[in-house]
Structures are given as structure tokens and as C-alpha cells.
Image (cartoon, helix red, strand yellow):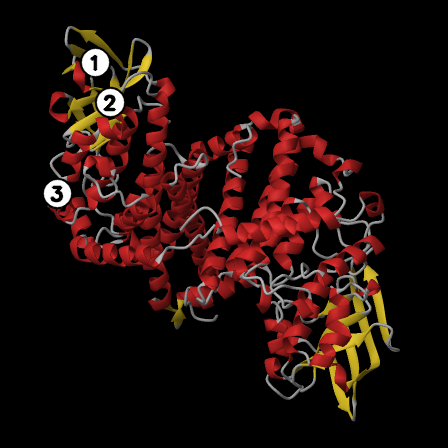
Amino acid sequence: MEFEFTEDQLELQRAVREVLDAEAPPELARAVADGRSDGDGLWETLVGLEWPAMALPEESGGLDFGWVELAIVLEELGRHAAPGPFVATVTQFAPLVVEAAGPRGAAELLAAVAAGHTTGTVAVDEGAGTWDPASVQATARRDGDDLVLSGTKHYVVDGAGADEIAAVVRLDGEVRVVLVPGSSVQADEVVPIDPAVRHSTIALDGVRVPADRLLGDGDAAQAVRRALEESVTAVAAVTVGACQRIFDIINEHARQRIQFGVPIGSFQAVKHKLVDMYRDIERARALVYYAALTLAEDHPDRTPAASMAKAAAGEAQRRCVQDGLQLAGGIGYTWEHDLHLFLRRAKVGELHFGSASHHRRRVARLALAGQDGS
Amino acid sequence: MRLTYSPAVEEFRAEFSAWLDANLPDEEATTVRPRSSADIPAWSRDFQRRMFDDGWLVPGYPPEFGGRNADLYEQAVFWEELGRRRITQSFNPQGLGIVSASIITFGTDEQKHRWAVPIMRATRTAALGMSEPGAGSDLAGLSTRAVLDGDRFIVNGQKVWTSGAHHADVLLAFVRTDPDAPKHKGISALIIETDTPGLVRRPFRDIARTEPDFNEVFFDDVEVPRENLVGELNDGWRVCTGSLAHEREMLWILWSQGLDRMLEDMLEQLNDGAGAGAADDPVVLDGLGSSIVDSWALRLLGQRQLARSQRGLHVADQSLLKLLGSEAQQKLALLMLESLGPAGLDRTVPPDAQQPYESDRAALSWADRYFFTFAGTISGGTSEIQRNIIAERVLGQPRG
């Protein structure tokens, strides 16, 4: 194993950071939080830089950079609490379309994504919060050349704004993926804890789409699981980035803030909390890039690795939000301070796509069944 | 980034693996067990000597010192093979890993051949005299005195926590040679033969094991020839902090393997129904998942350190890896012990739990394993000291 970035990857990281420092400063996240901006300008900039294309397969007009490179971008998006449809479109919608339809079947659709003409999202969970395709109850039935859908989907990221929704439903008992135009559904937007990551409850009842919007052939449960491994790893990468920013803010605060005549970072009670935050971030980042590597190489360990990444990111956010907010003292409790922008992004990562505890138990069950990834 | 080693490194692994197949000691002989960390049974002395002679004992060293100039990735797969087969590199770990390593790094040619080579070839054993009753976390505050008197030092004072001293032939002891200098600048490193008049060893038991390993070592006008000074006079702190430098990129592997060893046992025992259905308890599963993440994080961060060192970058992750590894072991041992419920009350270790070439420490009861993990979070710099080090040296926080 060679577990360190290549020179090219380090260069990409520098370039991505530079772009986002300029294009997604905290003022942007704040403007979205205050309702003064929808953040769409950033998406247009990223499309212009071909970032959405970067991660997509070559067959679909993408640049096929690979998953480690995508994880680098995602971590930086989290580090900047960047708004916009990148995460849902590139790491939730695109993988599900590719897995369900195959790279060729998905080519036209993803070319539109790569070109920035189409944004997307996925509708999987129905309220259990586990994103398990086996528990999907929503249905599609054939009606002439159309499919008629029924059911309700929860926690659909960008559900009210995405151009296309890849909805997981049952057709004749099989798990299938259907493309639903965002304009054709009733999206009930939830008031979000992070105003830059909006999600909706989607009513599919009575929605009618042409039958050619059904992706692939046969049962898609495995396709959904594989796609979710990418989505879960992506959320973990974003969460690690947000945690890193929280840590950077607090570590600097501890060096600068003088009380009792000394920087508060000279107190062991503060030092040790900082180290535990740092340790949990390093731990989570290691698992995120391991998961990215297994995705890049389509290694069998991708299943436990994705859950380990999500679990580790969840543990990191828990500590960073808790101790970060505590160590910031009163100033971090104010709306004016930037800290809460990143606290929100970190907490969103925990609550979407299965909690840390859910994924820890999943990792344990896989290991007990002999699929521990080693 | 990639998941696999290069073909050349895998070839190295295959070569070592074939050597082990041909050279492992007869299992029958291994019923004679080491009694302390400086007591090597004859079968193991013989094996360690063959490892040295064939260049497999410390692969990163040149052939003269039991190696083959292996690079860091080759050293990593060497450790992986030992771990996978549950083979202990040496039953005198401080002797090989610290005492001989210090002499190789800081000693004269004569010292290397007189002490380091015999320790590596297991014809002699060594213990490490660092801590004192008044110098634990504040190691540089040690007060055992050595006064230079012509061509010899006269040593007076006391060491403690000296693992295996009662079975060791020599000590590498850190002593104060200049009481007027700042505390880090008045320390020297001496090799002291344990049969020197005036040196008394008193072994004492710890809470996890039945045989004593620790010792108090008392020095009462112990005469040590000046030629036993390792490094320059009053430059012992450099020897003390540098002794692990040659293989500090590798230390995490032992934490990682210890954790994986426990994890394998836990998975096996839970699958066998241990703890009356603990394998279905969501709380146990939650903890187990976290420990599996720990195990991977340790392996991955260790590998990252290797990759960085291999590229010649400065690496400051040792404290992080020690903290992560030692606390992860503690967390897992506690989880398993509590998962067992009343079955955890039994201290008996099944006789087949002991692997022939592995340290007996790996096969303790879960209660004793849990206690033994405190050797990890206390010795070699406590977890609290590691956190201070990381905060100050890595995170840039001011000293308190």
C-alpha cells in the first residue's frame, strides 16, 4: 500500500483550495445562511471549471479523474461549507444512474450533467433513515407507455431544486430506478439546520413518466447499494472537510485568545481537547481516502470501507462540533462568528445517509460475517 | 495512492515467507516459555541467531548487523509476515529494539561488536534503565548519579520499571553525570553488567501477569569502566531520544498488530456465542464497529507515515500513532470484557490460546488484557504526555 497523495493529487488539492478560497469564502455560506443568496453562482463557476465532469466516466463525456481526486474536491467543499448542487448531482445522482443504467445507458444524461445543463438527486429513503433499498415501498406500475408512481420519499437532498430525481421504487416487486423530472413532483422543503443543504419530502403519488425513464434491466437493489457506497463516502469526505475547518478555527483561537495572561492553548484542558479533535479528524480522513481508493479500484472492501468512512466521519464531527463550540467560548455561540457555518455542515453529514452508529453496527456485522475488509 | 505494494516488495515478502517456512523452530520445543522480557528460551535464542545470521532480524540494517538494507516498505511487509504468523521478533524486545539499537546508532565499533551484536544474536540479553521513582513522565529529571573517577564511573541511585532486569546480562542505564548542568544536558548513557558488585535487582509483579517482569534496580557504589559510556559524556539525552529513531517508522505496526490480534479473538469468540448473545447486542456491535475503524485508522495512518518517510519527508506522527494504538487497545479490551458479562469473571486462559511463537502476553484473559493495556497508555510516555507533545509540536500550541 502507498497511502499518501501523489504529486498530481497534491497539486489538485492546492488548485481546488485556491478556487474555493476565492469563490466560496465564508461570506458566501453566510449569505446563503442569511437567505441573501441561493449559492447558484458557485455551481456555474464549478461547471465552467469542469469539476462536475471531473468525476464522471469518460463514456459519458466525463474526465474520469478517479475517486481519490473526487474525495479531494469533496473534502475542500466541506472545508468551505460550499453551497450548491455539486454533492447531490455528482455523488448521489450520477453514481445511481451509472450503476442502474450502466455507463453507456447513462451517457446522454451524464453528458448533460458534465456540461452543467442538468442537476440531479436521489430519492431512496422513506423515513427509516437507513437508505436501505430492501425497505423501499414506493411503487411504479405500468400504464400503457407510461409508469405511474406512488409513495413518499424523505430526505431528498436538493429535492426542490434538482432537474432530475433518480427515484428508487418497486416495479412488479423488483427494486428499480426511475428518472423523475424535478418539475413533476410535489417537493415539501424541510426547514434545514444547514440552509445550504436543503432537503425535501417528495410525494410520488400519481406522478406519470414515460416508461423509457426506467433505468437498466432487472432488480437494481445491488446497483442502489453500490451507488450509495459512493454517496456515503462522499458525505463522509465533506464532513471531514467541515471538521477540519472547525479545528483550524479553534486551534488558531486557542493560540490567540489570552486569558489569565496566557494563550488558552497553554492549558492542558484545552490542549487535550484539541488533540482529540485532531486525532479524530486524522482517523476519519484516513478512512475516507481508503474508501475512495477502494471505490477507485472497485475493490470488494468498498462495502465495509464506505461504512467505516461514514462512521469515522460521524465520530469526528461529534467531537469537533461539541468541543469546537465549547472551546470557542461565547464568541463561537454568536451568529456573527463563522464557526456555526461549519458546525452545521458537519452535523448535516452525520444525519444524512445513516448515522455513525448505524454504520458502526453495519461494519461490525460485516466483520462477524467474515467481511471485515482485511 | 494505491492499495497494493510494488511487485519488488511482494517479492521481498515471498522470500522472507519462504525463509520462515524453512527455519521456524520445532513447535514441540516452544512449550518452554520465556519468564520475562529478558529471558529467551533456548529454542528462541537459536531462532533469533539464525534470523540475524541470515539477515532477517532487523532487515533495515546492513548484513553486518543482522539485516539486508531493506527499505521502509520491505520492512513493513517483514513485520506484516511476522504478525500474520504470530511470530515474536525477539523475546528480549527492549534489548533488541532499544539497547542494541542505541549502541548501533551511538556506540563505537568496539561497543557494537562487544554488546550490540551479542544482544542481537541472543547470546546475551539486555534491559533498559530509564525510569526512576522520581523520574517517570519527567524522565530528564532522573537522579541516579555517576561520578567519573579516573577510568571508571561510580554509580549510585535507583531505577524502577526495569523490564526483565532480573534475567538480563546488561543494562543500558541513563545516569546523571553533571548535576550542575540543565537537566537534559547532564545525562549520560552507560552499559552496566548486571553482575557488577553493588548492583541489586528486585523483581516485582504487575496486575496483569503471574510472573514478575518489572524490577527495582539499586546501585550502591557500582563501578563501571569508562569504555562503557555510549555516546559522549553528558550527551545521553540524545541517546535516550534517538534510540528509537532507526525504526520509529515501524513502531505503529506493533500497536496495530496487537489491536488486530485482540480483534480477531473477539470476532471469533462472539461468533462462538461468547457473552450470551453479545453478537446481537446493538451496543456491543456499535463498540465493535468503532474498534474496527480504530484498527483500520491505525494501519492507514501508519502506512501514510511510511509513505512520507520513504519520500524523505519529516514525519511527526509517532505520538499520534502511539496514542491511537494504545487507547484503541484499551477500548477494545474493555468492550470485550464487559460484553462477556459474568463469563468475564473467569481468569483462566484456555491452554490452546497460546500461540507457539508469540508472546504470552497475547493470550491473557480479557480482564488481564484490559489491565495490560495500561502498560500501553502509561509506559513510553503516558497518553497525557503524548497529548501535550502533539499539542505543542504538531498543533503549535504554547507550552504550559
Q: Residue B153 placed where, x, y %?
A: 78, 86
Tell me whether circle 2 and circle 3 mark residues in contact (CB < 8 Å): no
Q: Considering only order in the chain, which callout, 1 or 2, is on the residue closer to the N terminus? A: 1
The residue drawn where x is 18% and y is 11% is A148
Asked if residue B360 is positioned above or below residue B310 in the image, the reply reads above
Mark 2 closeness class: few <14, some 14–19, many ≥20 residues within 10 Å = many
Q: What residue type is disc 3 on?
A: Asp
Q: Quadrant of residue B194?
A: bottom right
Q: CA distance from mark 2 to mark 1?
A: 10 Å
Report the residue at 53% width, 53% height from top: B9
In this rendering, the answer to whether A195 lies above or below A180 is: below
The earlier-in-sequence mark between 2 and 3 is 3
Same subunit, tags 2 and 1: yes
In the image, which disc is placed on residue A149? 1
Which residue is disc 2 drawn over? A167
Q: Is residue A23 left or right of residue B306?
A: left
> Which-is-in-front pick, marks 2 and 3?
2
Which label belongs to residue A40? 3
Task: Tell me the subunit letter for badge 3.
Answer: A
Residue nearest the viewer, comparing B186 with A31: B186
